[in-house]
């Protein structure tokens, strides 16, 4: 068998292992990956949505706040998958599993490939579930079939990028608790400091520049534009460029950290 | 000349001048090691002596800074992949996947070894049966005892039918019964012709299992030989008698002149061979004349080995 076959086979095995893990932890994952974003959706739509919707003014283009909110909640759903991924990677490193596979003729990159693959899968499933709930709550997207494909593409690219970054974080943090804590800026802080809930323009001056120029904003803006049928211009390309850059940095960082770990 | 060549071809492990340090701390300071095929070789030493580092180097997990080694005839550096194909490692920390069932753990290793599905299943079932894990096969290790977890860990190592197995402290933390089971398993493996390198802190364990023992201290091998050879260097077992006052001690010392007096501890140490005859003899000679406060039987342990070969106790050394 060729080296490539082995690489594919070992990656598939690790993917199988991670899928088994996800099934064993299904209840926990449903709560953290789907229920938490749904609660955020409810909170922001029903409790804060009245005022926020009014404040949007022309930006909302006459649509209810939920149409503005859902793309942001989608990004939060994806970012919420960072914690579990970093934790799973960290658990393998701190336990003896990595030592076992390193003393075997297992293809080096297979373990991380499995983690990242299933991480993306979890983020996509969660995004689909949250979208379904949003539709039930009154979210009315105006996207064409082509727009939907673009939405799925951006969601997948962003998931892939954050999954590699989370894997690297899981490798460099020395403990499982540390891995979880270190992803909080990704899953909590950055979404708030972007156009996830309100436009970056509406923020205080110091934060405004950061919010307008950090990667979450073009991702949210592209999804929002595509889903609400507004013109998006070149924003999706900017979003994809950010995804590619984050994925590359995360990948290289993770590979280097895995060699050292 | 012939003997040298023969030794090389028969060696499962042959290492010369292995060195490793972490920062300024030297962990291995020039270790030479030759392990014959089919042997059980024990690395005996306290925590921090470098046992695990040797295992990690020889199992390709970390590189040595200096020195050369061949494992089952393959060069450790140049042919690491081939080495991995013939060895099995059961480390100090459990590598059991806690979210997979016992059977799934074995099948996972089987997949990573690229075994065909039918062989994977057959081998997993065989190992579950052999290690008395059949009933636990469909449960996750969360429900296992320490001994069961350790057996599953070893079973995972055996999925690949390795020719050389590294066992890093295989019985540390196990209850006496689980330890006996583990010893039995190790003996069976040897019977099948597998070479074993095990590390242990217990002289008793090395004595029971090993053909050869190397005593490790501060990254150096300070003594090596068969268990018999090593034990000959250790002062033998003895009976300890403790007394309430020095008058009683003096009287007992007069009755048993071969004993060694320790006036500070108010103890008399009488050399003791195996069996209860010497003990009965000592008790009879003291009779009712002297009141003995306490009697204990001391068998040589790691501390005695250390004292004999390094001139200081292992507990001080490990700090």
Image (cartoon, grey):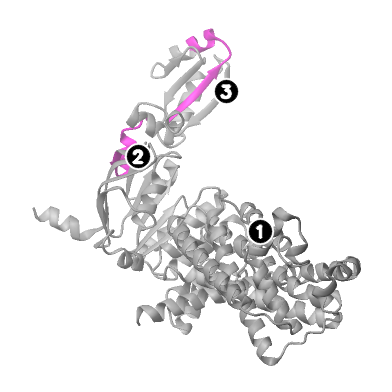
Depth check, mark 3 against mark 1: the one in front is 1
Determine crowd level at label 2: few under 14, some 14-19, many 20+ residues with C-alpha closer than 10 A: many
Spatial separation of the CA atoms under disc 3 and disc 2: 39 Å
For marks 2 and 1, give the one nearer the viewer.
1
Q: Chain of mark 2?
A: B
Q: Is residue A255 magenta?
A: no
**Dot label at residue A173:** none
**Which element is circle 3 on?**
strand
Percent x, y of residue B135:
62, 70
* The stretch drawn in magenta includes residue B248: yes
Classify residue A215 by image quadrant. Answer: bottom right
Binning the other alpha carbons within 10 Å of mark 3 as few (below 14), some (14 to 19) or many (20 upward) gives few
Q: Is residue B208 visible?
A: no
Residue B18 is situated, as x and y percent measured from the top left of the image, at 28, 46
| Residue named by callout 3 | B294
Residue highlighted by disc 2: B219
Residue furthest to the bottom in view is A145
Relative height, residue B244 to residue A80 (above, below):
above
Image point (45%, 73%), residue name: B112
Q: From the viewer's perspective, tell me whether residue A193 is left or right of residue A165.
A: right
- The mark lying in front, picked from 3 and 2, is 2
Q: Nearer the viewer, residue B233 or B87?
A: B87
Q: Position of residue B48 (x, y in %)?
A: 43, 39
Disc 1 element: helix
- The residue carrying mark 1 is A210
Magenta range is: B223-251
Q: Are marks 2 and 1 in contact (CB under 8 Å)?
A: no
Alpha-carbon distance for marks 3 and 1? 78 Å
Q: Nearer the viewer, residue B220 or A14?
A: A14
């Amino acid at each position: 068998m060729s080296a490539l076959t082995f690489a594919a086979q070992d990656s598939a095995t690790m993917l199988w292992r991670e899928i088994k893990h996800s099934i064993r932890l299904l209840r926990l994952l449903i709560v953290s990956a789907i229920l938490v974003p749904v609660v955020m959706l409810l909170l922001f739509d029903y409790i804060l949505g009245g005022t926020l919707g009014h404040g949007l003014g022309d930006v909302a283009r006459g649509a209810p706040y939920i149409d503005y909110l859902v793309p942001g909640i989608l990004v939060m759903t994806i970012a919420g998958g960072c914690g579990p991924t970093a934790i799973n990677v960290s658990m393998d490193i701190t336990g003896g599993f990595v030592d076992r596979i390193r003393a075997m003729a297992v293809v080096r990159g297979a373990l991380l490939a499995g983690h990242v693959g299933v991480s993306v899968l979890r983020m996509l499933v969660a995004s689909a579930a949250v979208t379904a709930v949003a539709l039930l709550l009154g979210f009315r997207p105006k996207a064409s079939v082509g727009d939907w494909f673009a939405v799925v593409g951006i969601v997948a690219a962003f998931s892939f990028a954050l999954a590699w970054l989370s894997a690297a974080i899981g490798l460099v943090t020395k403990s499982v608790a540390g891995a979880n804590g270190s992803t909080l800026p990704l899953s909590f802080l950055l979404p708030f400091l972007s156009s996830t809930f309100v436009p970056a323009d509406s923020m205080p001056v110091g934060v405004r520049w950061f919010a307008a120029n950090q990667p979450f904003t073009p991702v949210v803006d592209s999804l929002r534009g595509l889903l609400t049928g507004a013109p998006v211009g070149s924003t999706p390309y900017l979003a994809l460029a950010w995804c590619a850059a984050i994925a590359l940095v995360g990948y290289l960082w993770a590979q280097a950290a895995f060699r050292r770990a | 000349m012939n003997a040298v060549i023969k030794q090389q071809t028969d060696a499962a492990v042959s290492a010369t001048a292995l060195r490793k340090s972490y920062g300024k701390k030297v962990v291995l300071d020039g270790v030479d090691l030759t392990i014959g095929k089919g042997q059980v070789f024990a690395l005996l030493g306290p925590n921090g002596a470098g046992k695990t580092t040797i295992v990690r180097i020889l199992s390709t997990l970390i590189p040595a800074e200096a020195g050369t080694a061949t494992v089952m005839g393959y060069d450790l550096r140049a042919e690491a992949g081939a080495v991995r194909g013939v060895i099995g490692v059961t480390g100090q920390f459990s590598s059991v996947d806690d979210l997979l069932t016992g059977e799934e753990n074995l099948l996972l290793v089987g997949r990573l070894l690229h075994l065909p599905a039918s062989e994977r299943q057959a081998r997993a079932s065989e190992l579950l049966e052999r290690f008395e894990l059949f009933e636990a096969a469909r449960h996750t290790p969360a429900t296992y005892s320490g001994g069961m977890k350790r057996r599953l860990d070893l079973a995972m190592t055996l999925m690949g039918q390795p020719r050389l197995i590294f066992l890093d402290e295989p019985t540390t933390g196990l209850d006496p019964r689980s330890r006996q089971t583990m010893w039995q398993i190790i003996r069976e493996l040897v019977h099948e012709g597998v070479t074993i390198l095990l590390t242990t802190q217990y002289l008793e364990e090395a004595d029971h299992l090993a053909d050869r023992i190397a005593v490790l201290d501060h990254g150096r091998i300070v003594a090596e030989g068969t268990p018999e050879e090593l034990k000959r260097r250790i002062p033998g077992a003895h009976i300890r008698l403790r007394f309430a006052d020095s008058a009683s001690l003096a009287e007992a010392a007069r009755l048993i002149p071969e004993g060694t007096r320790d006036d500070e501890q108010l103890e008399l140490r009488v050399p003791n061979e195996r069996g209860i005859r010497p003990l009965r003899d000592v008790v009879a000679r003291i009779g009712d004349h002297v009141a003995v406060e306490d009697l204990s039987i001391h068998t040589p342990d790691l501390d005695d080995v250390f004292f004999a070969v390094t001139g200081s106790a292992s507990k001080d050394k490990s700090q």
